[in-house]
Image: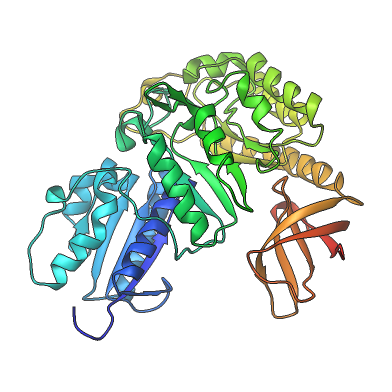
Amino acid sequence: MSTIKKKVAFKTLGCRLNQYETDALVSDFDQAGYEVVDFKDAADVVVVNTCTVTNQSDQKSRNIISQAARNNQGSLVVVTGCMANNYKEKLEGQDKITYVVDNERKASIRQLVDAHFQGEILHPSNLEGDVFQFSTVDKSLHTRSSIKIQDGCDNFCTFCIIPKVRGRAVSRPLPEIVENVKNTLANGFKELVITGVNIGRYEWEDKRFEDVLEAILDVPGDFRVRISSLEPDGFGNRFYDLFKHPKLAPHLHLCLQSGSDKVLLRMRRMYAYSRFAEIVDRFRSQWPDFNFTTDLIVGFPGETEVDFQESIEAIRRFQFSHVHAFKYSVRKGTRAERMEDQVSEPVKTARSAELREASEQMREAYLKRFIGRVQTVLVEKIDSKGFASGYGEHYVPVRFKAKNCQKNTFQKVRIERLEGEGDNLELLGQLVED
């Protein structure tokens, strides 16, 4: 490469796993001597890490690809992520895209770009395929870093395209995970997020998900651990006891998808509503303020008004602090595509609005519990007015007057009040002086 640094920009859509994989690519390019710039700035290379989970995700991904090509004419545009797996040939036929790299080879994008600038013609299909080959994150677009323990899924829910675009479930060897954790902590990260497609189904030799968590928690250091997204069928009794460990944050994103057993069956989910309730109740009996967030799909084929109201009831029953609501979106190649009783768009929109309102009420009620109490906040940013913000251990957003504290440090904050509305609610507090 010439002495003038090549500039590279990134854009990520979709899940936490995608975010982690982008962060690993950022580190890889940075270590190889590229200058990482903002997506809005001109770059020699633009990497778009796409999502295809819904039609809306596809549309967003297409818009971002067009924007990247428009703003960087003559530059390399590399498209990767789940849309690259789902619409590979269609994307490869577009002149504005230089390379389309599937998820299996995403970790080798920097080698592809290097080869291009050295005048070599290297086809993405000739890259090494390994979903666990990513660099340890040291230069991140975030203050917390994810640890990828697993990829792919064997569940084949009737609405989901993920097994097609991420492949069958595969688990990363435990010694590699522990090594990755140690390296990430050595790079200064204070919060690790355990991530994958279906992490509860981790299986390597005789090790299961709980063994991975235990091994990570046993690594020495001042850090905390979060679990990204979990299916209600993916763990046993030992899992609950692990939350007695001070490093494991009392928060789970537990995917419900519907409050109706009839709909769960049509979705081919691997649990009933009663199983979900049993998990939440068991956690809350030990830790009353344990934070649950979830995903819910609105307007799945055959969802009646009665089914939908069961989802609304579930929001109130489980007091979720956040609900990620999806309007059901037909994905080609899934069984739900062929189901009868597709719900009309206006009904889906009305139900989404009602669900969002119930979710916001619960979020406000949950956050109010913390007024007068202390949270340990990991400082993510400090604004120009001297206010620090970050998340407490219960994954609640907190803002406070910084008073000489630094980014990426843990601070004890006494919560005084709640401000804002909807998704912008946050707790305001005062630093607890030692």
Q: How many marks?
A: 0
Q: Residue at x 82, y 59 (%)?
A: 413
Residue 434 in sight from this viewpoint: yes
The location of residue 240, given as percent across then percent down, is 67, 25
Q: Is residue 196 above or below residue 418?
A: above
In the displayed structure image, the side of residue 147 where residue 352 appears, left or right: right
In the displayed structure image, the side of residue 157 where residue 215 appears, left or right: right
Residue 418 in sight from this viewpoint: no
The location of residue 362, given as percent across then percent down, is 78, 39
Residue placed most toward the observer, 159 or 139: 139
Q: Is residue 319 above or below residue 413?
A: above
Q: Residue at x 72, y 31 (%)?
A: 315
Q: Tell me where residue 79 sits by quadrant.
A: bottom left
Residue with the most extreme bottom position: 4
- Coloring basis for residues: rainbow
In the displayed structure image, the side of residue 382 where residue 231 appears, left or right: left
Quarter placement of the C terminus: bottom right
Q: Residue at x 74, y 21 (%)?
A: 282
The location of residue 171, given as percent across then percent down, is 37, 32
Q: Residue at x 87, y 66 (%)?
A: 433
Residue placed most toward the observer, 374 or 71: 374
The location of residue 231, given as percent across then percent down, is 54, 27
Quarter placement of the N terminus: bottom left
